[in-house]
Image: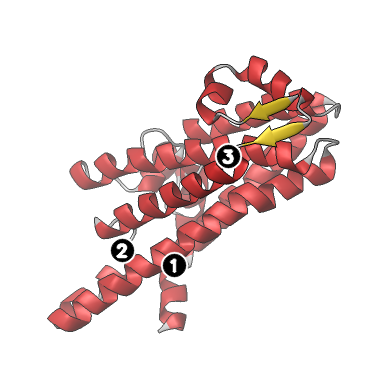
Amino acid sequence: MTYSVNLIKLFFRRDDHLFKLNEAERIKNVWNLLFLLLVLTILTYSWTAWLGLGSEAISTNMTALNRVEYEFTKTWFLIGRAAYALIVFLFILFISSFFYWLFNNASYKRLLIIQMNVLLIMLIERMTWIPLMVYAGIDWYVSPFSLGVITSYITELDWVIYFFGAISIFQLFIIWYQVKCISWLSTTKKGWIWTGVIFWHILLWAGTAALSYYDLFLIQIIK
């Protein structure tokens, strides 16, 4: 049986396509979708960088720069975001798939396909940040879709706010979606699948919080 991957149908007709994916002896259209997702990831992060989103760490020094230095700094920021997009692409698809493959008796390639939809959901989440930040001046970590808003009323500790700001309805949906899909593709007990998926996301949220917290410090080191 040959299965041609269709991320939209895998998303909306999950059970039917997971069955076909699990039974398939040959899987097509993987490389085409990988390239498409790579382009979408780079474009998403580059667009947000072009709008100046996430540039708070360098904007404090902008007034001291002349026109040429200002444009040069913007260009490097844009290049840096494109490189960061590549890292996100590789990490979410290949490293996360490898982690789940270690603890579940499912094929790496099938887990990779599930992660493609996960990356797509993450890109949609980032697209929601754009109108919030441009028109409402709301940073990603206090998005109304995340726990960062509530946390900011409880504590002023930046790292804690960043951590809970990374926990959004999109992330919770991703966890549910991953558990459902991995349960189809693996015979691992669902309790262990839940544990592994939640543990991995806690690490990702902690990493996101750390990157956000030390953003300015890292830029100063690079300079």
Residue for badge 3: 116
Taking depth in this image into account, of 145 and 105 the one nearest to the observer is: 105
- Whichever of labels 1 and 2 marks the residue nearer the N terminus, that label is 2
Q: Check the picture and name the quadrant holding the N terminus.
A: top right
At mark 2, the secondary structure is: helix
Residue for badge 2: 56
Q: What residue type is labelled 1?
A: Asp
Q: Are marks 3 and 1 in contact (CB under 8 Å)?
A: no
With 139 as the anchor, is 70 left or right in this view?
left
Q: Quadrant of residue 77?
A: bottom left
The residue located at (36%, 34%) in the rendering is: 144
How was the colour assigned to the protein in this rendering? secondary structure
Q: Are marks 3 and 2 in contact (CB under 8 Å)?
A: no
The Cα–Cα distance between marks 3 and 1, rounded to whole angstroms, is 27 Å
Image spot of residue 61 (x, y percent): 25, 77
Residue for badge 1: 215
The correct choice, above or below, for 192 with respect to 112 in the image is above
The residue located at (46%, 49%) in the rendering is: 161
Q: What residue type is labelled 3?
A: Met
- Whichever of labels 3 and 1 marks the residue nearer the N terminus, that label is 3
The Cα–Cα distance between marks 1 and 2, rounded to whole angstroms, is 9 Å
Residue placed furthest toward the left: 67
Q: What residue type is labelled 2?
A: Glu
Taking depth in this image into account, of 177 and 209 the one nearest to the observer is: 177
At mark 3, the secondary structure is: helix
Image spot of residue 136 (x, y percent): 21, 41
Q: Are marks 1 and 2 in contact (CB under 8 Å)?
A: yes
Image spot of residue 87 (x, y percent): 54, 60
| Count of numbered labels shown in the rendering | 3
